[in-house]
Image (cartoon, rainbow, N blue to C red):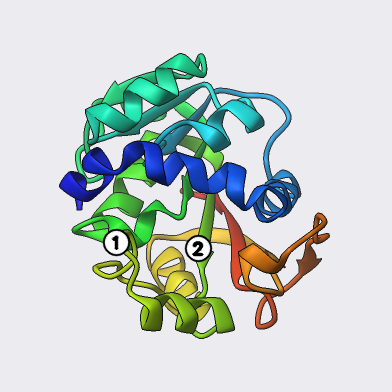
């Protein structure tokens, strides 16, 4: 997967301009749970689109080519893998994993690492394409260069992993109710899941 994102980093980044209103819709959903203060980390920061817009302090990604674009956006980046974060225990107030969980080798290990580097009562923020949604089914069928090897999760599967790791106070917001290329204005997020293709899940670390 790293090779795909490295080879097509510019093409990947351009999607956010082509599907601008879908991107803005995703940001609106993320802002529903994003802390206004504190030190944050984005695992799988990519080209820095979300980190820059949301004010996330630091991003990590295995693709040097993607990180070069993020650096140009002014995002503070480190090269590395979500399964082995190069940070001390309790280093962050919140950790965001936006879309990236479907691309990693060991999703549960990434979530464990996210929990490790979170302070107690810190928040994990996940954004996923719901496997059971119209969008998840569309991407699986389309088999784009980015998603053909992706492992999508249902919201139930994500919640089960978070519960297993001891995260509490889970909340859900959803958006993207049409195919991204058909969205002409920002779609406001609504609570819950089951309708939107893009779902944001937030939980609290409680030890």
Q: Which residue is mark 2?
A: 128
Q: Residue at x 38, y 36 (%)?
A: 10
Q: Which disc is residue 145 wearing?
A: 1
**118 with respect to 89 (left or right):** right
Q: Is residue 110 visible?
A: yes
Q: Residues within 10 Å of mark 2 (few under 14, many from 20)?
A: many
Provide residue 192's location: percent of width, then percent of height: 72, 73
Q: Is residue 87 visible?
A: no
Q: Residues within 10 Å of mark 1 (few under 14, many from 20)?
A: few
- Residue 130 in the image: above or below residue 24: below
Mark 2 vs 1, N-terminal side: 2
Callout 1: helix, strand or loop?
loop
**184 with respect to 4 (left or right):** right
* Quadrant of the rendered image containing residue 91: top left
Of residues 17 and 206, the one drawn nearer to the viewer in this rendering: 17
Callout 2: helix, strand or loop?
strand
**174 with respect to 128 (left or right):** right
């Amino acid at each position: 997967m790293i090779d795909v994102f490295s080879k097509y980093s510019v093409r990947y980044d351009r999607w956010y301009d082509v599907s601008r209103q879908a991107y803005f819709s995703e940001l609106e959903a993320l802002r529903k749970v994003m802390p206004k203060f504190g030190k944050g980390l984005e695992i799988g920061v990519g080209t820095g689109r979300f980190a820059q817009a949301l004010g996330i302090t630091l991003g990590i990604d295995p693709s040097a080519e993607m990180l070069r674009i993020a650096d140009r956006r002014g995002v503070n980046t480190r090269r590395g893998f979500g399964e082995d974060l190069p940070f001390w225990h309790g280093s962050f107030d919140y950790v965001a994993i936006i879309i990236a969980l479907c691309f990693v080798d060991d999703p549960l290990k990434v979530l464990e690492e996210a929990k490790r580097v979170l302070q107690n009562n810190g928040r994990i923020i996940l954004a996923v394409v719901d496997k059971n949604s119209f969008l998840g089914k569309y991407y699986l069928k389309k088999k784009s260069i980015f998603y053909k090897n992706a492992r999508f999760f249902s919201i139930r599967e994500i919640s089960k992993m978070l519960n297993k790791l001891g995260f509490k106070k889970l909340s859900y917001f959803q958006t993207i109710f049409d195919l991204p290329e058909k969205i002409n204005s920002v779609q406001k997020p609504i609570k819950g899941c089951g309708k939107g293709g893009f779902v944001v899940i937030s939980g609290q670390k409680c030890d």
